């Protein structure tokens, strides 16, 4: 079974001195938890400046996830299969005119969007998905408090998915997979800003068929990466 973390941060973070501040430390953390690969966003573009990004050093186990910002003061759409949108952090309207223009371009180019739950709200996600139904959105860092809103969104929009970073309640991942299909659930940790050992332990103990666990563990994100 291939295990791929769709939601990982490389670089120093405000919460403390972390091993994943550089590539060597991050890969060592992946080894410690038996994670084969990761999609990584650099903390510089996540928390500071996406317009002048810090490049993620090349490594066969790491896929760089650029942060994109719409509009003339934003960023060009990169050559990537997965990008991240951070409307709260970088002060733009997710479902505004420029946000929708960006979303349409991402959908046309078959690029998947990671979208942090802490950076948006259910109403804006609904408007974005309704206006651009072909856009694949992975809602990350959701948590148990968002389950009712998540159910509302997943019922309405077939291209919305979730990661497991904060779906840590009893049988929450199983409920998502059984109701919406395992193809809409991706393994992610949000580390190092959130715990990585918990989601990794949970992955190894899911009460789901082996084929579903393999999809969640890595099959789904590998498909999105092509």
Image (tube, rainbow, N blue to C red):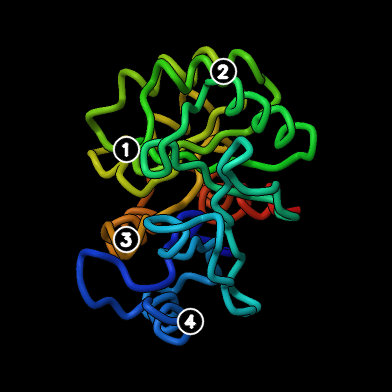
**Residue 132 sits in quarter:** top right
Which residue is the site of mark 2?
157
Does residue 39 appear left or right of residue 178 in this picture? right
Residue 173 shows which numbered tag?
none
Q: Position of residue 21 (x, y in %)?
A: 37, 78
Vertical side of 135 occupied by 16: above or below: below
Between marks 2 and 4, how big is the CA–CA gap?
A: 36 Å
Above or below for 174 versus 197: above
Question: Which callout, 2 or 3, points at the residue further toward the start of the chain?
Answer: 2
- Name the N-terminal-most of marks 1 and 4: 4
For disc 4, the marked residue is 23
Establish if 135 lies above or below 211. above
Q: Quadrant of residue 144?
A: top left
CA gap, disc 4 and disc 3: 23 Å
| Quadrant in the picture for the N terminus | bottom right
Residue 34 lies, in percent from the top left, at 44, 74
Q: Nearer the viewer, residue 108 or 224?
A: 108
Disc 1 to disc 4, how far (Cα)?
26 Å
Q: Helix, strand or loop at disc 2?
A: loop
């Amino acid at each position: 079974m291939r295990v791929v973390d769709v939601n990982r941060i490389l670089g120093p973070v405000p919460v403390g001195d972390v091993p994943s501040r550089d590539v060597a430390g991050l890969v060592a953390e992946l080894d410690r938890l038996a994670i084969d690969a990761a999609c990584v966003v650099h903390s510089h573009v996540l928390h500071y400046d996406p317009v002048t990004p810090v490049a993620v050093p090349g490594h066969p186990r790491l896929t760089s996830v650029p942060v994109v910002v719409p509009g003339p003061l934003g960023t060009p759409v990169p050559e990537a299969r997965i990008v991240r949108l951070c409307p709260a952090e970088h002060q733009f309207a997710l479902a505004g005119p420029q946000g929708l223009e960006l979303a349409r371009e991402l959908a046309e180019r078959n690029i998947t969007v990671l979208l942090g739950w802490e950076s948006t709200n259910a109403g804006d996600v609904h408007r974005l998905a309704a206006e651009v139904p072909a856009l694949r959105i992975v809602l990350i860092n959701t948590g148990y408090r968002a389950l009712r809103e998540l159910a509302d969104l997943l019922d309405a929009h077939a291209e919305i998915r979730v990661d497991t970073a904060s779906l840590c309640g009893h049988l929450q991942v199983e409920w998502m997979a059984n109701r919406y299909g395992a193809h809409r659930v991706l393994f992610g940790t949000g580390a190092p800003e959130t715990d990585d050992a918990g989601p990794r332990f949970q992955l190894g103990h899911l009460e789901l068929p082996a084929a579903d666990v393999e999809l969640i563990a890595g099959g789904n994100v590998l498909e999105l990466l092509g």
